[in-house]
């Protein structure tokens, strides 16, 4: 390949590589650094025998992501409170479970619920699932990429699918239903209306808030409609995080909103919906993870 051809081949798949690295790491800056590193390696490599640039680059990004996760393992284990992926703006439609391509869409989904489940997988399992389902990599290449046997790779992909699907809402709500519930939730929270908040939540609803030790947030996942409603009302009526201007935004493939106070983003909210009520609430308070919330959609920059 000429230099121009190498550059063109890389730029064509760069959005996919960014999304792969983000799903692996849960961080936008980390994803960008990994893809930049992949570009440098691509630029230095002998590409004369490369038949499939996308496969070569996706393997490289997967390996770099696995190395990164191993390096930050201790940091993640000692993180203050629950860890959530950095919220990002997206422009993809909400996947639907009855779609024929659902397995692929599951791999491409970046909802906070699915990203949080990916975080529970071992780095190699995460890479195996994403490379197989989102990049359609055959098992022989997957085995070579991960240094595992083909049977081991099949088992890792199967385990990942099972875990992801078991943690997915049984019925995916429409965007319109998400938005209606979000508006009702925000209004009830700002009014401190615990009764209405409780009615909007499923009995086993959960609240996960990420402050990273840098902003006020619950230090554990809160479960149960009444407990979630009480905490939400308390935060909304006693903290600045719910007293600013509310702006709607599509966050991680789901309708969400963020709140600004004096021009600074204080918090972002995203929900999972099940049976017409809120099943899970994700609150990002860590200022480090909110700095780039309004950047262009991941992979489209």
Image (spheres, rainbow, N blue to C red):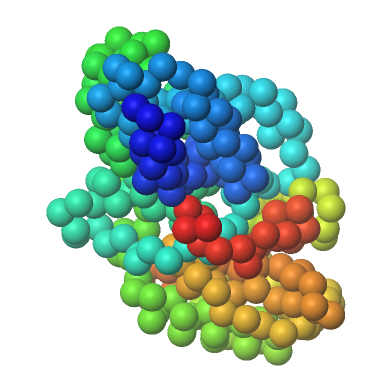
Query: How far across and down, in percent of the image, does residue 10 sit?
Result: 42, 38
| Residue ID at (72%, 26%) | 74
Q: Is residue 268 left or right of residue 171?
A: right
The residue that appears at 57% across and 41% down in the rendered structure is 31
Image location of residue 102, percent across then percent down:
24, 52
Q: Compared with residue 78, is residue 22 higher up or lower down, i.e. above or below? A: below
User: Is residue 280 rendered to the left or right of residue 1?
Assistant: right
Q: Residue at x 25, y 25 (%)?
A: 51
Residue 274 visible in the snapshot: yes
Q: Answer whether residue 231 is visible to the viewer in this image.
A: no
Which quadrant is the N terminus positioned in? top left
User: Looking at the picture, how far across and down is residue 33, in whole percent?
Assistant: 62, 37
- 199 on left or right of 94: right
Residue 101's spot in the image, x, y percent?
20, 51
- Residue at 69%, 72% (x, y): give it: 232
**Vertical comparison of 13 with 206: above or below:** above
Residue 192: name its quadrant: bottom right
Please determine whether, in this image, residue 35 is positioned above or below residue 12. above
Q: Quick one: 236 or 85, which is closer to the camera?
A: 85
Depth check: give the residue in front, 43 or 184: 43
Q: How many marks?
A: 0
Tell me where residue 72 sits by quadrant.
Answer: top right
């Amino acid at each position: 390949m000429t230099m121009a051809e190498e550059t063109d081949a890389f730029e064509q798949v760069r959005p996919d590589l960014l999304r792969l690295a983000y799903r692996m790491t849960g961080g936008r800056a980390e994803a960008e650094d990994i893809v930049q590193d992949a570009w440098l390696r691509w630029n230095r490599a002998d590409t004369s025998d490369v038949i499939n640039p996308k496969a070569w680059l996706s393997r490289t990004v997967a390996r770099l992501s696995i190395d990164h996760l191993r390096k930050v393992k201790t940091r993640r284990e000692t993180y203050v409170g629950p860890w959530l992926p950095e919220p990002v703006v997206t422009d993809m439609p909400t996947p639907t479970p009855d779609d024929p391509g659902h397995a692929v869409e599951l791999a491409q989904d970046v909802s906070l619920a699915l990203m949080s489940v990916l975080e529970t997988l071992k780095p190699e399992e995460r890479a195996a699932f994403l490379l197989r389902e989102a990049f359609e990599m055959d098992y022989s290449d997957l085995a070579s990429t991960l240094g595992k046997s083909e049977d081991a790779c099949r088992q890792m992909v199967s385990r990942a699918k099972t875990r992801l699907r078991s943690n997915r809402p049984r019925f995916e709500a429409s965007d319109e239903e998400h938005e209606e519930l979000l508006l009702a939730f925000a209004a009830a929270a700002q009014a401190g209306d615990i009764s209405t908040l409780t009615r909007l939540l499923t009995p086993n609803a959960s609240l996960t808030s990420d402050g990273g030790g840098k902003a006020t947030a619950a230090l554990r996942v809160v479960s149960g409609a009444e407990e979630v409603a009480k905490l939400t009302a308390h935060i909304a009526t006693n903290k600045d995080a719910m007293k600013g201007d509310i702006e709607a935004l599509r966050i991680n493939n789901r309708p969400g909103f963020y709140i600004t106070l004096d021009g600074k983003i204080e918090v972002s909210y995203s929900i999972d919906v099940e049976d017409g009520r809120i099943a899970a609430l994700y609150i990002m308070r860590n200022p480090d993870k909110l700095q780039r919330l309004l950047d262009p959609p991941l992979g489209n920059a």
